[in-house]
Every structure is written in structure tokens, then in C-alpha cells.
Image (cartoon, rainbow, N blue to C red):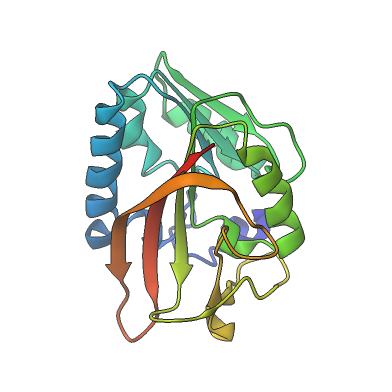
Amino acid sequence: MNQIYEQKLWGGTDSDFYSGIGSHKPEIISPYLEALVAFLVSQNNALVVCDLGCGDFNIGKYLTKHTKKYIAVDIVENLIIRNKKQFQADNLEFHNLDISKDTLPAGDCIIIRQVLQHLCNAEIKKVVNKIANYKYVILTEHIPSGEFIPNIDIISGQGIRIKQHSGVNLLAPPFNLKIENKKVIDCYILENNKGRLVTTIYKIF
């Protein structure tokens, strides 16, 4: 991930970090933010939220005020240092962690937006094993349009499973996440048959 930001593989200027159009394009993030804010408000702004893979924080900055505490996590140390300087609030924390290896902060809800899609199945499974500690998981994944084969393995990095006509499905093998219920709260159809960005809230047992 360091290399992705250093080489601007997701775009951006030479002087700053940029987490890609999925975190910046208004047509993508506006309905997503509207759905997440509605959920957080429905919980009386009382949830402790852990944002796993917070990136440049262009999305998290709009959600912080709707939480009891917002804990933003990313694997890129220099990005976390930058975020700490640029974004400050009494209920906001930034942590430099590897979500597949490190102990995650305690909380009520985790947000994982377009993160798991970049990880191999072994790393995703390590994350899934930690999810049971939370009440809600809000997951956004880039998946193909229509039916697809879930969870074809990849090497962790910039790429995702879309070229193999696959995508992450935590309820399918080898992950088999056990949930109480789920609700799709946002679905953005990408142009030129490039799939869709689907956001689902899972309530964990």
C-alpha cells in the first residue's frame, strides 16, 4: 500500500495522498454518505466506529460527528501521520495498524470500504475472525454485475478480483461469516460494465 500512494497508482497530486475515485467521486460517495449518516443517526450517534482502511479520510471526515468515537485505522504510517495533522476532533483517533495481523480497537461497528477486495483470502480470513467482536459490519466491495464466482484468491496488492469475474462474499466459503441479518444500503453501478460498488450492513450475532 505504501507503493500505491508513493507512485500515485490511484491518482492524485505529487504533494498529497489520494485514495482513488471511490473515495472522491461525488456520484459515488454522496449516496454512500447519506446512507451511512442515516444509519449512524438511527443509532443516536452513540456508536464507537472503527474505520479499517481509512485512507485519505475524505469519507471519514463526514462521519466522525455522528459517532461517540471514530477510530480510523490504516496500514500506511505516513498517511496516518498526515491524517493526524489534518483532521482533529475530540472523538477522533488515528491508528497505524495492519488489520490482518494486529489487534483491532474495541468498538460497536466497523467500516471496511473497498479494502478486503485488495487482500488475499488468507488475510481476509484473519480479519473475518476478528469481526465477531463487533455488533455491526458495514462492508463496501467492488463486485461484478450479475452472478459471479465468489472469493477467487488473489495476491494482496493494488488489483482486485473483478478481472476473474469474482468478488468478495463474506458469507460464502472460505469465510462463512455468521450473521443475524444483512441489509444492502447502497449500490453504485460503474460505467462500461465495470461492475458495482455494493455497501451492506451486517448485524453480527
- In which quadrant will I find the N terminus? bottom right
> Looking at the image, which residue is at 67% across and 42% down?
99
Q: Is 73 situated above or below 128?
A: above
Q: Is residue 125 left or right of residue 168?
A: right
How far across and how far down the image is residue 147, in percent?
A: 45, 81
Number of marks present in the image shown = 0
Q: Is 45 situated above or below 189?
A: above
Q: Is residue 45 left or right of residue 173?
A: left
Foreground pick, 187 / 157? 187
- In which quadrant will I find the C terminus? top right
Foreground pick, 43 / 164? 43
Q: Is residue 58 left or right of residue 78?
A: left
How far across and how far down the image is residue 185, in percent?
A: 30, 52
Foreground pick, 100 / 138? 138
Q: Can residue 179 be seen in the rendering of this structure?
A: yes
Q: Is residue 12 left or right of residue 161?
A: left
How far across and how far down the image is residue 126, in percent?
A: 73, 48
How far across and how far down the image is residue 36, in percent?
A: 30, 41
Q: Can residue 55 be seen in the rendering of this structure?
A: no
The outermost residue toward the top is 90
> Looking at the image, which residue is at 41% across and 13% down?
90
Q: Quadrant of residue 63?
A: top left
